[in-house]
């Protein structure tokens, strides 16, 4: 039996999951399974690193996302090495990806390459002449085998436009602030330009250039590729589909929380990172989003992206978290159904979105509910069919709170291949304290200790479920119900209590990505025939409940007076009733009213069509297409941010808390942007960050992103990120 908690590890080893730990020492990485070392590789040997990734992931000891986070590499790299290993074995990982016959530089080729470099010939032409890849030339330059005669700093500086120069040029434009591509805009105005292509210039200290570091990951997630597949293209104009999507994505990453906030930003500076002269105006951006919303393809766009994410990591959808998020409506133009907003402790007009997050709490998709739809109905009608389509024949486990409690539905779902983990609803008797044992697990990557107990419980007449209880320090017992019989008690507890990660996701998205923002106040017709709870029935039940409470109080007071009756004053019951005739009259009258109200309640329908609730207004709901579109873009940005966060695993002790703050500052970091059409590169040279640790993390992120050899969309320019050189130690007197 494999030991799960790895107590016999060398000091400094880091846990990856319950099955794997890694230990770094003197340029080597040792992988531990249980307490035994199972694999060792050199961190400087690319083949050994690729082989380790393929072996570990193919044996299902660790998930690609977990291993990528532990090794500080991109998840797509690990997934690619896993696929290569499963298809061709260890030999396949030894083959160079360029698949060229001559990929090495011998002495003669080095000499020839050096002479060509001295003549000022670019790297692509040199590689073509020598019959090697451009990456081979770049690697030789990096190792010092080749030396490129760089221009002096003054020469480089002379080519870069300063922020002051750019500001003056932006203000001097006669057509509009920041407008420099007048000819293209003239063609766009008459519908002769499909869209403007990115065209970069050499610029110094471009604000917000740090957001370009997330662009390769956003594109790897399929944002542009899937959008082109679903939407095709927009109407002819200066700003096309790519410019619109990247504008919204960069706004999300830069925490520009609404299109109106673009008015306070420099349009020219934001335009540079798009490869355009300026960012779209607010009205232009809203018009483009409206055009995309009118196509009614936003749900398809989200579904295609979700399918892509699930196919890349099927293990992530083995467990999914489901919860509703209420978006309040503060406008007075339209009359929307009211619901309870827990965080405001109010009942107000609002719309409920039901979010589905994967096992890592990364967002998958959302569904906007119709008026007063419950979690249970949404899971049954929409979420389960969608999840079964994504997972195929694989079983899926849904994790949600008490709102979805329904043993009858649990039995039906179990037959369909869907398991549940949820809190038990209702009152239950406590278990003996001695039945609880200590168990260890992981919660949000940190080891935790629970006091747990379990039993099999008959729910209903014929359906058995597994009940796991946690004994809290206060003595309270939290009951968790599940249909999973194969999981350990600590795994069930960890999955259930990890549901708070979804609540933290909502909080983060509200504060940082402005999740509740309404991109439009437009409405669309709602299904007027839908049955919703009858308000009159609810009011009548409340009235009956109040009448019962009043009746009980009167009866209690009447009985108390009878108990305290002085027989000298009222020696008989008849005399007592005469003296307290008012009480008895009130009791009889209230009982009659209660009986009448109860009879009236029985005649009332529990649910009525939505259209009958307000005869003066047609039932409407907030438009969903543009909201789906912007939320989908925000989901892709959040996942890209999470991928960058995983690469910072070794830099921040509290990666989730510190790492996202670091990335938030990184996205606003200025950089020098210099295109080189001959070399086919787009250099982004970042300015230093606040401290040495941040700079070291930035440099490593740049190196990882450079390995992707990502081309800026719609160009042939390979993005090359560079960070300033940082000192290895703190200078004396720098910190006190």
Image (spheres, helix red, strand yellow):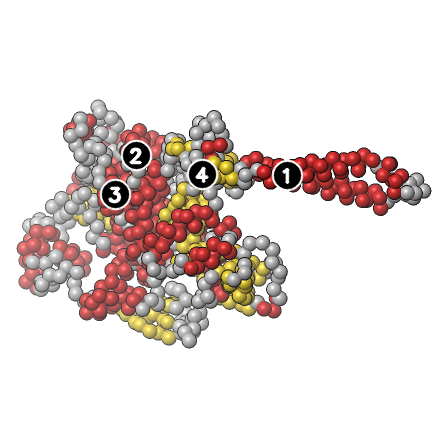
Q: Residue at x 38, y 54 (%)?
A: 358
Q: Residue at x 60, y 40 (%)?
A: 602
Sequence order check: which comes first, mark 4 or mark 2?
2
Mark 1 to mark 4: distance in Å?
26 Å
Sequence order check: which comes first, mark 3 or mark 1?
3
Crowd around label 4: few <14 · some 14–19 · many ≥20 (10 Å)? some
Q: Which mark is residue 230?
A: 3
Residue 194 visible from this viewpoint? yes
Give the camera-side residue of 597 and 586.
Answer: 597
Residue farthest along the right direction in this orientation:
568
Label 4 near label 1: C-beta < 8 Å?
A: no
- At mark 3, the secondary structure is helix
Q: Examine the rendered structure and indicate whether residue 267 appears above or below residue 220.
A: above
Q: Residue at x 41, y 48 (%)?
A: 381
Judged by depth in the image, the label closer to the viewer, 2 or 1, is 1
Q: Which mark is residue 715?
A: none
In the picture, measured across the screen, residue 353 lies left or right of residue 239, that is right
Sequence order check: which comes first, mark 3 or mark 2?
3
Mark 4 to mark 2: distance in Å?
24 Å
Coordinates of residue 107 in the picture (x, y in percent): 8, 64
Judged by depth in the image, the label closer to the viewer, 1 or 4, is 1
User: Which residue is tagged 4?
Assistant: 530
Sequence order check: which comes first, mark 3 or mark 4?
3
Q: Which mark is residue 294?
A: 2
User: Which residue is tagged 1?
Assistant: 599
């Amino acid at each position: 039996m494999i030991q799960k908690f790895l107590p016999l590890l060398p000091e400094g080893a880091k846990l990856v999951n319950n099955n794997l730990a890694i230990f770094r020492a003197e340029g080597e990485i040792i992988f531990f399974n249980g307490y035994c070392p199972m694999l060792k590789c050199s961190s400087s040997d690319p083949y050994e690193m690729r082989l380790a990734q393929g072996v570990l992931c193919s044996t299902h000891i660790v998930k690609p996302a977990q291993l990528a986070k532990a090794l500080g590499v991109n998840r797509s790299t690990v997934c690619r090495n896993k696929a290569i290993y499963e298809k061709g074995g260890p030999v396949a990982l030894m083959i160079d990806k360029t698949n060229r016959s001559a990929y090495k530089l011998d002495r003669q080729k080095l000499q020839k390459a050096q002479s060509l470099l001295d003549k000022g010939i670019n790297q692509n032409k040199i590689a073509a002449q020598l019959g090697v890849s451009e990456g081979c030339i770049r690697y030789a330059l990096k190792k010092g085998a080749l030396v490129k005669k760089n221009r002096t700093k003054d020469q480089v500086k002379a080519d870069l436009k300063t922020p002051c120069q750019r500001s003056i040029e932006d203000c001097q434009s006669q057509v509009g602030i920041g407008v420099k591509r007048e000819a293209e805009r003239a063609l766009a105005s008459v519908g002769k330009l499909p869209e403007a292509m990115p065209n970069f210039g050499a610029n110094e200290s471009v604000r917000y250039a740090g957001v370009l570091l997330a662009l390769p990951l956003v594109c790897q997630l399929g944002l542009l590729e899937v959008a082109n597949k679903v939407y095709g293209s927009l109407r002819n104009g200066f700003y096309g589909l790519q410019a619109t999507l990247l504008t919204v994505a960069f706004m999300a990453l830069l925490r520009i929380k609404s299109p109106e906030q673009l008015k306070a930003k420099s349009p020219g500076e934001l335009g540079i990172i798009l490869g355009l002269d300026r960012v779209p105006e607010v009205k232009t951006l809203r018009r483009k989003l409206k055009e995309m919303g009118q196509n009614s393809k936003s749900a398809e766009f989200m579904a295609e992206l979700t399918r892509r994410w699930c196919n890349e990591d099927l293990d992530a959808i083995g467990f999914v978290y489901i919860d509703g998020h209420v978006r309040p409506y503060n406008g007075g133009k339209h009359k929307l159904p009211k619901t309870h907003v827990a965080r405001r402790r109010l009942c107000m007009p609002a719309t409920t979105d039901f979010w589905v997050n994967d096992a890592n709490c990364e967002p998958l998709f959302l569904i906007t509910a119709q008026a007063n739809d419950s979690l249970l109905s949404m899971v049954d009608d929409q979420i389960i069919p969608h999840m079964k389509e994504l997972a195929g024949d694989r079983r899926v486990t849904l994790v949600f709170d008490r709102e979805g409690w329904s043993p009858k539905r649990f039995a039906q779902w179990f037959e369909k291949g869907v398991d549940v983990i949820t809190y038990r609803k209702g009152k239950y008797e406590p278990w003996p304290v001695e039945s609880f044992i200590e168990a260890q697990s992981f919660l949000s990557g940190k080891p935790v200790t629970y006091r747990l107990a379990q039993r099999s419980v008959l729910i209903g007449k014929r359906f058995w479920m597994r009940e796991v209880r946690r004994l809290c320090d206060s003595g309270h017992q939290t009951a968790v119900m599940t249909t999973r019989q194969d999981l350990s008690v600590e795994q069930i507890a960890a999955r259930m209590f990890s549901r708070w990660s979804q609540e933290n996701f909502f909080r983060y998205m509200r504060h940082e990505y402005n999740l509740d923002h309404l991109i439009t106040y437009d409405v669309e017709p709602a299904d007027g025939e839908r049955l919703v709870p009858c308000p009159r029935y609810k009011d009548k039940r409340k009235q009956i409940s109040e009448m019962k409470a009043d009746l009980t109080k009167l009866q209690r007071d009447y009985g108390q007076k009878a108990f305290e009756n002085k027989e000298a004053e009222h020696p008989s019951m008849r005399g007592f009733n005469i003296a307290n005739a008012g009480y008895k009259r009130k009791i009889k009258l209230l009982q009659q009213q209660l009986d009448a109200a109860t009879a009236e309640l029985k005649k009332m329908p529990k649910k009525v069509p939505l259209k009958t609730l307000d005869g003066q207004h047609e039932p409407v709901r907030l438009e969903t297409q543009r909201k789906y579109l912007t939320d989908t873009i925000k989901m892709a940005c959040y996942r890209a941010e999470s991928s960058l966060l995983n690469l910072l695993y070794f830099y921040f002790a509290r990666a989730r808390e510190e790492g996202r703050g670091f990335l938030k500052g990184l996205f606003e970091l200025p950089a020098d942007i210099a295109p080189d059409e001959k070399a086919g590169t787009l250099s982004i040279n970042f300015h230093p960050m606040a401290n040495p640790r941040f700079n070291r993390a930035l440099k490593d992120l740049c190196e990882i992103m450079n390995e992707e050899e990502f081309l800026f969309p719609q160009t042939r320019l390979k993005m090359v990120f560079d960070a300033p050189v940082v000192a290895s130690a703190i200078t004396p007197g720098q910190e006190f």
